[in-house]
Image (cartoon, helix red, strand yellow):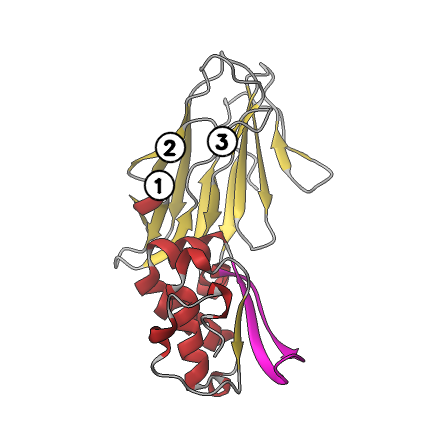
Amino acid sequence: MGGDATALLDGGSDGLQLSLELPTSGQADDAAVAGDGTTVFADPTRQTDVGIQTLEDGAVRALTVINGPQAPTRYDYKIDADEGVVLELADGGAISIKGLDGSEQGMIHPAWAVDANGTAVSTHYEVSGNIVTQVVEHNTPGLAYPVVADPKVYYAWWQLFTWSEWRWNSYYGMNQLSMELSGWGRYDAIFNAGQFLSSGWSLLQSKHSWWMFTPSMRQQWECHVLGGLAEWGTFDLEYERYSNPNWRSRIGMWPVSQTCNW
């Protein structure tokens, strides 16, 4: 974290090195670290406080706390990278962070904001060059302050999954590769499934010995990803499940949770 309210995000060899400038007023108090690890910049005018924290899946969340109706409705986040990036609005309201070659390198999760009662507040992103602006339409009668908005930034390929590991499945009597998709992974599985079929599978092979992957596991992976909204739990790819090249014929079977378990 820089002294000018700039977060430095380092994705390592499989990610980006970004600087994320936070929308402080320019007169925010020096950063303080809260009990949960959130770095907070308090606004002396009490209009808008800004915090930043690292989440379990590796993403960085920028918290904008809007304390009253006189606070701004527009909050700018400046993103820079030595190697250069391109920011583009994507389907579903997210922002794709792309390399100069056009490849997706990261994502900013769709805009989100709620008031003190948990009521959703209308919000969206705008992009101009390397500046992402979150517009929070909080000056609406009936809202309870504070209003919290939290852009969530993913900046490394390994952040497509919250975790992945080999486990023994006693019910089936075989090993399985289990994983949980992160917010970015879930987003890509729904809105960009074609790319995620390849990028997610390649990432799993790079994290786990590639020779452990069977044809059936690839079929199960495709089934889970293309299941989209129906696949909200963990993805389990059983190592010794028999190959089923015609697995697509099972789509629409009941129960849905068993579609990819043949």
Total marks drawn? 3
Q: Nearer the viewer, residue 85 or 121?
A: 121
Q: What residue is pinned by disc 3?
A: 113
User: What range is drawn magenta here?
Assistant: 161-181
Residue drawn at the location 44% of the way across and 75% of the way down: 220
Q: Position of residue 114 (x, y in %)?
A: 52, 29
- Crowd tier of the residue under label 3, counting other residues whose Cα lies within 10 Å: few below 14, some 14–19, many 20 or above: many
Identify the main secondary structure in magenta. Answer: strand
- Look at mark 1 in the image and give the residue it sits on: 93
In the rendered structure, which disc, 1 or 3, sits on the residue that comes first in sequence? 1
The residues bearing labels 1 and 3 have C-alpha atoms spaced at a distance of: 13 Å
Which part of the image, by quadrant, shows the N terminus? top right
Q: Is residue 249 magenta?
A: no
Residue at 67% in and 80% down: 170
Above or below, 78 against 82 in this view is above
Gap between marks 2 and 1 measured at Cα: 7 Å
Magenta residue check for 178? yes
Res. 75 visible in picture: yes
Location of residue 262 in the rendering, given as x and y in whole percent from the top left corner: 47, 79
Q: What separation in Å lies between label 3 and label 2 (alpha carbons)? A: 9 Å
**Amino acid type at image mark 2:** His
Contact? badges 2 and 1 (CB < 8 Å): yes
Per the image, the residue denoted by label 2 is 124
